[in-house]
């Protein structure tokens, strides 16, 4: 089976690698243009591009696929490349560009199997750009991968395969890796099934639709008036990007790993009025930095980072940056 693959980040690279290893013929790879990254803002190739170059697969990096958009010449060249590929299907995973109708039509039955998308949620929950992070932030206990037949809507196509897993206490980075491996396995399974027969789809349920909006940098700032459990989930959801942050004096610290707990009466009564205000540092020990949060809860932070510094355990962090009870993190 000949395939066109469209994807950009590591999540997509895992699927592309699995397809190549399974013996599918990769006729063309689409990925986003190189982006500046790092302190020197040098151009960096996406993980998908790096794999395609290493394997010698044909590669295209259009800035857009819209024939009447800002880069019509890129779109026209991509259209010609897709038609020349004569592929049986297009597999899409975290590509980052909208597929216009002409793309869907290129692989539509009966000439092809369509455009198959690997989405990191159990649809219709968490359609959109950031399903992994939003699931953790919302306190979902389970996540998963859905393979769907793409249509003109935003993650609205028929479901081909779904498999779920427990989220546990995963950060977004940890859950990402587990879902990437799951998605890679499912897409190979689905295409093997398609080689021997039909791959029927099921319309998505109408109930339970939610949208996973893109993560914005401004969301990283911690609101200490929120319950500690909610803050801990957000810290996990924003690891590694954008990283939850809190201001202490003149320092903006990143908080990377944390757990919620109730405030011990002895720590609570040590403050005026018998109540520690949200954001108050209650104790700083090698076991973690304990900070008062909303609803008489507290957040124990296990890993911290100063600007320009490394991510450190609380014990290592406190050796170079001592903290004292009574200090306040800004809300």
Image: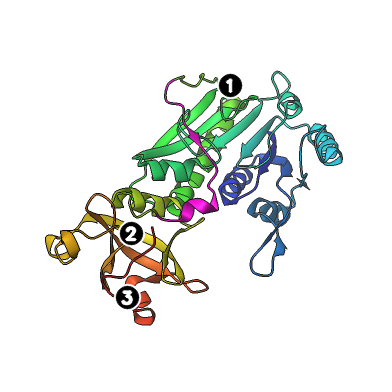
Secondary element type, mark 3: loop
Is 213 magenta? The answer is yes
Within-10-Å neighbours for mark 3: few <14, some 14–19, many 20+: some
Separation of marks 2 and 3 at Cα, in angstroms: 17 Å
Q: Which mark is residue 323?
A: 3
Mark earlier in primary sequence (2, 3): 2
In which quadrant of the rendered view does residue 197 lie? top right
The residue at the point 35 percent across, 81 percent down is 319
Residue closest to the far front = 273
Q: CA distance from mark 1 to mark 3?
A: 64 Å
The residue pinned by badge 2 equals: 258
- Does label 1 or label 3 sit earlier along the sequence? 1
Query: Which quarter of the picture shows residue 66?
Result: top right
Along the line of sight, the residue nearer the viewer: 314 or 77:
314
Residue position for label 1: 197
The residue carrying pointer 2 sits among few (fewer than 14), some (14 to 19) or many (20 or more) residues within 10 Å by Cα, namely many
- The residue positioned 23% from the left and 60% from the top of the image is 276
Closer mark to the observer between disc 2 and disc 3: 3
Q: SS for tag 1? A: loop
Dot in front, 1 or 3: 3
Q: Main secondary structure of the magenta part?
A: loop
């Amino acid at each position: 089976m000949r395939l066109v693959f469209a994807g950009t980040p590591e999540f997509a690279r895992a699927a592309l690698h699995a397809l190549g290893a399974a013996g599918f013929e990769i006729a063309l790879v689409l990925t986003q243009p190189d982006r500046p990254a790092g302190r020197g803002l040098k151009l960096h190739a996406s993980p998908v591009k790096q794999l395609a170059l290493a394997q010698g697969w044909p590669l295209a990096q259009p800035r857009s696929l819209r024939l009447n958009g800002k880069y019509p010449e890129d779109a026209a060249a991509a259209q010609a490349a897709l038609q020349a590929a004569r592929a049986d299907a297009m597999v899409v995973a975290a590509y980052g560009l909208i597929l216009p109708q002409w793309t869907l039509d290129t692989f539509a039955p009966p000439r092809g199997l369509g455009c198959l998308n690997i989405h990191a949620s159990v649809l219709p929950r968490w359609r959109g750009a950031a399903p992994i992070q939003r699931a953790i932030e919302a306190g979902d206990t389970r996540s998963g991968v859905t393979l769907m037949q793409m249509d003109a809507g935003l993650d609205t196509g028929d479901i081909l395969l779904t498999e779920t897993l427990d989220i546990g206490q995963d950060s977004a980075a940890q859950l990402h890796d587990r879902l990437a491996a799951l998605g890679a396995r499912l897409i190979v399974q689905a295409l093997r099934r398609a080689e021997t027969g039909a791959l029927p789809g099921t319309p998505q349920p109408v109930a339970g639709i939610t949208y996973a909006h893109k993560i914005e940098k401004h969301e990283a700032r911690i609101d200490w008036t929120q319950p500690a459990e909610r803050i801990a989930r957000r810290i996990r959801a924003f690891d590694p990007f954008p990283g939850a942050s809190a201001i202490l004096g003149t320092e903006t610290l990143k908080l990377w790993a944390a757990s919620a707990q109730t405030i011990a009466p002895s720590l609570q009564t040590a403050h005026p009025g018998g109540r520690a205000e949200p954001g108050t540092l209650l104790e700083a020990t090698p076991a973690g930095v304990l900070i008062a949060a909303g609803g008489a809860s507290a957040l124990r932070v296990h890993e911290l980072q100063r600007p320009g510094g490394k991510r450190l355990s609380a014990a290592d962090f406190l050796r170079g940056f001592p903290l004292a009870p009574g200090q306040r993190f800004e809300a």
